[in-house]
């Protein structure tokens, strides 16, 4: 595929993940092995090429889209339309409502919308592949364990108590206000995507994390490998904490996912890289490639309003897949390799285009 962009790709922004496919060695690629990138390029497997406005297949807006880029994107899209081309836009926050240019294709990193138009697609993160920490072997679950199945979880969470209930009510009101059309217009005039994202999400997720953790801790049938943090664990967190986090995932049979609305979840893809079966607290979040990936088969989905019944959902899943759990794990790893490694992902979206 041939693309055009009018500026050097901006380092540290999501669009920079195009760099290894364009073979731009001066970019820092987070987790991709640079030798593998070079090898793919030398074998002629580069699948994206940069070219001119006239000869390109698509214009690519060469940065994250934020509200303060609105005027610039509009002008860029206008230029693309003159050449009868569409613009590919990478959206970071829940501001997709504003990207209503009729000749765009959006890959969004986060979204709180229940439905997305046909020109909007989920954009997963590309975290480190954790399988290398287990000697490239999937840590397979024991189908008839001598001990309780374990559920791994390392994150930060508020406790589910009166204070957090009041906090939830207040933030929920803020969230609802921010969904009102005139509020969006005001926020758009302020042109600060970070404020909008925080207000829309309103930190409600922490309330539910606390509630889920308290419910699971009461279950007697499963072992809960929970490590509580005072803040979110990121790829920049101290090495010892990150090592503890990786070991927790490897040693757990299932992995708990509490995401709220945003589709972006590094932990989910790290868990998938190990072939782990996620226990997903269903908050209507978006997933990439829903037409190709049977999420209902590989995830244990628990509706957010039925958290108290989480043990029933886990038990039902295990009983329905007796003798198949290891097979499901291998399938999860297969899907990870074919959809969520960076180069595989871009091959998929290019074939879609």
Image: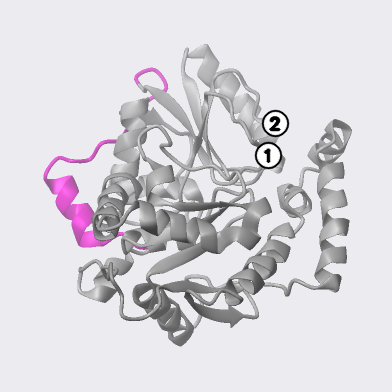
Please name whichever residue, 142 or 352, is drawn nearer the observer in this view of the structure. Answer: 142
Q: Inspect the magenta stretch and tell me whether residue 36 lies in it.
A: yes
The reply to whether callout 2 and callout 1 are in contact (CB within 8 Å) is yes
| Other residues around mark 2 within 10 Å, as few (<14) / some (14–19) / many (≥20) | few
Q: Which residue is mark 2?
A: 98
The residue at the point 34 percent across, 40 percent down is 346
Q: Is residue 326 left or right of residue 148?
A: left
Residue 255 vs 15, above or below: the answer is below
Q: CA distance from mark 2 to mark 1?
A: 6 Å
Q: Which residue is mark 1?
A: 95
The residue at the point 47 percent across, 55 percent down is 11
| Other residues around mark 1 within 10 Å, as few (<14) / some (14–19) / many (≥20) | many
Give the magenta-colored segment's residue range: 29-55
The residue at the point 25 percent across, 50 percent down is 334
| One can see residue 113 in this view | yes
Please name whichever residue, 56 or 200, is drawn nearer the observer in this view of the structure. Answer: 200
Name of the residue lying farthest toward the left: 43
| One can see residue 28 in this view | no
Please name whichever residue, 135 or 166, is drawn nearer the observer in this view of the structure. Answer: 166
Please state the horizontal and vertical placement of residue 331, each as a whole percent of the image. Answer: 26, 51
Please state the horizontal and vertical placement of residue 129, each as a whole percent of the image. Answer: 32, 63
Q: Quadrant of the N terminus?
A: top left
Q: Splitting the image into 4 quarters, where does residue 130 fall?
A: bottom left
The numbered disc on residue 306 is none
Scheme of colours in the image: one colour
Q: Is residue 283 left or right of residue 127?
A: right
Please state the horizontal and vertical placement of residue 285, each as a whole percent of the image. Answer: 58, 45
Residue 9 vs 250, above or below: the answer is above
Q: Name the secondary structure under disc 2.
A: helix
């Amino acid at each position: 595929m041939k693309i055009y962009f009018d500026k050097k790709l901006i380092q540290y922004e999501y669009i920079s993940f195009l760099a290894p496919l364009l073979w731009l060695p001066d970019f820092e690629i987070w987790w991709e092995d640079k030798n593998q990138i070079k090898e793919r390029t030398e074998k002629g497997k580069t699948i994206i090429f940069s070219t001119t406005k006239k000869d390109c297949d698509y214009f690519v807006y060469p940065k994250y889209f934020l509200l303060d880029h609105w005027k610039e994107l509009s002008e860029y899209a206008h230029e693309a339309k003159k050449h009868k081309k569409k613009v590919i836009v990478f959206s970071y926050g829940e501001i997709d409502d504003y990207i209503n240019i009729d000749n765009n294709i959006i890959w969004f990193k986060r979204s709180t919308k229940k439905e997305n138009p046909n020109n909007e697609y989920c954009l997963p993160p590309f975290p480190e592949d954790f399988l290398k920490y287990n000697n490239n072997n999937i840590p397979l679950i024991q189908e008839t364990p001598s001990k309780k199945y374990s559920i791994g979880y390392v994150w930060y969470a508020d406790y589910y108590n009166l204070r957090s209930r009041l906090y939830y009510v207040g933030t929920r009101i803020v969230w609802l206000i921010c969904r009102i059309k005139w509020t969006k217009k005001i926020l758009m005039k302020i042109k600060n995507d970070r404020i909008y994202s925080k207000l829309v999400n309103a930190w409600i997720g922490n309330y539910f994390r606390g509630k889920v953790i308290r419910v699971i801790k009461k279950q007697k049938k499963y072992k809960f490998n929970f490590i509580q943090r005072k803040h979110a664990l990121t790829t920049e967190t101290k090495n010892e904490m990150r090592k503890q986090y990786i070991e927790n995932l490897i040693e757990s049979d299932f992995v708990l996912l509490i995401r709220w609305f945003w589709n972006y979840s590094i932990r989910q893809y790290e868990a998938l890289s190990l072939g782990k079966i996620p226990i997903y607290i269903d908050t209507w979040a978006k997933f990439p490639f829903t037409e190709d990936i049977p999420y209902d088969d590989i995830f244990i989905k628990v509706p957010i309003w039925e958290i108290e019944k989480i043990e029933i959902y886990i038990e039902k899943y295990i009983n329905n897949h007796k003798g198949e759990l290891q097979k499901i794990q291998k399938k999860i790893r297969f899907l990870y390799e074919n959809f969520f490694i960076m180069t595989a992902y871009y091959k998929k979206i290019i074939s879609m285009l």
